Image (tube, rainbow, N blue to C red):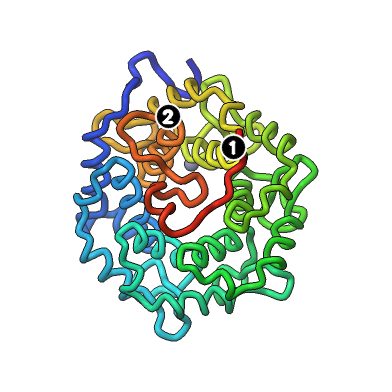
Amino acid sequence: MENGQTESDPKDLLFEKHVNYVTNHGNDKNDFEYTMTEFLRMSGIYWGTTCLDIMGELDKLDKLSIIGFIKKCQCIKSGGISACEEHDPHLLYTLSAIQILCTYNALDEIDVASVGKYVQSLQQPDGSFFGDKWGEIDTRFSFCAVAILALTNQMDLIDVDKAVEFVLSCGNVDGGFGSKPNAESHAGLIYCCVGFLSITHNLHRLETEKLAWWLCERQLKSGGLNGRPEKLPDVCYSWWVLSSLTIMGRSHWISGEKLKEFILSCQDTETGGFSDRPGNLPDIFHTLFGIGALSLLGYPNLKKINPTFCMPEEIVEKLYKVQIMDS
Ligand SMILES: [Zn+2]
């Protein structure tokens, strides 16, 4: 077998271990990892809550302290939300915070209207979005912007047509998308752009067949998926590639059985959690995307996940109707 996979790799989901791994993650405020990840703490909480919710164990986390933390991270001036208290707000963390609040049905705990104004303030004349006041442009931020506005029912605050034109201008001849016009195709950014088009109901603008081919060529002999040609497989790409194919109604173009084997071989049998590939250390990011991809593959005893928002389908259903292509 390749990429560190061995015959003794787990063949089933180590349910209890993952629940413990996620529940205890970041509990010790003195631990190195907790300090190190301050700059993405809000996303870390989103990865953890979503992961537990998909496993039906959300009540293992302290809802009130999580909501209290989010309230402290909203900037009074701009309305945006930061990764952590006293950091600058950013669209990435604003989306994570909104996703967590939706999961807890607690959007009214923050000033949602000023979140909308924050997103609106970051749209540029060409339709693109700055990630924050520092002015970096990336298709990831276009996705965050429409995802936040969709979940909070404020889409009319931006120029959606211009936003769509910008994302389409980042398309490449291979059918994929990059971070900005003329940037190389990359599965993570393809997810953002396909997700963006799913939210704005513009999937017909994709070169579906060409893009689906590019995506299914990401599957390697090990069953795992990579993010670009010539790269190693990685559990998070199981999510970016499979969710894109699912939105496009083409998830059956790859071998789900082989992918499931690869993902299961990335579990840490001692501590719980998933790593990027077999034998590496687990982390909360790859744990969510491993479990999320297994949910898309129909793994038993996991809640159905929405491929566009990476949140339980039952929550998204109540808030927004995404566009999904027929298979
Ligand atoms: Zn990864």
- Residue that appears at 42% across and 43% down: 305
Q: Is residue 41 visible?
A: no
Q: Which mark is residue 302?
A: none
Q: Which residue is mark 1?
A: 245
As helix, strand or loop, the secondary structure at mark 1 comes to helix
Q: Residue at x 39, y 25 (%)?
A: 265
Q: Nearer the viewer, residue 116 or 46?
A: 116
Q: Secondary structure at mark 2?
A: helix
Split into 4 quadrants, where in the image is the C terminus?
top right
* Residue at image mark 2: 263
Relative to 213, is 159 above or below?
Answer: below
What residue is at 31 percent from the left and 38 percent from the top?
273
- In terms of depth relative to the viewer, which is nearer, 268 or 122? 122
At x 21%, y 35%, the residue is 16
- Would you say 218 lies left or right of 274 here? right
The x and y percentages for residue 99 are 40, 59
Q: Position of residue 263 (x, y in %)?
A: 42, 29
* Measured Cα–Cα span from mark 2 to mark 1: 17 Å
Residue 64 visible to an observer of this rendering: yes
Q: What is the three-letter code of the residue carrying label 2?
A: Ile
Relative image position of residue 262 (x, y in whole percent) = 45, 25
Q: Position of residue 239 (x, y in %)?
A: 49, 40
Name the quadrant containing residue 75: bottom left
Q: Nearer the viewer, mark 2 or mark 1?
A: 1
> Which amino acid type corresponds to the residue marked 1 in the rendered image?
Leu
Mark 1 within 8 Å of ligand 1, using the beta carbon: no
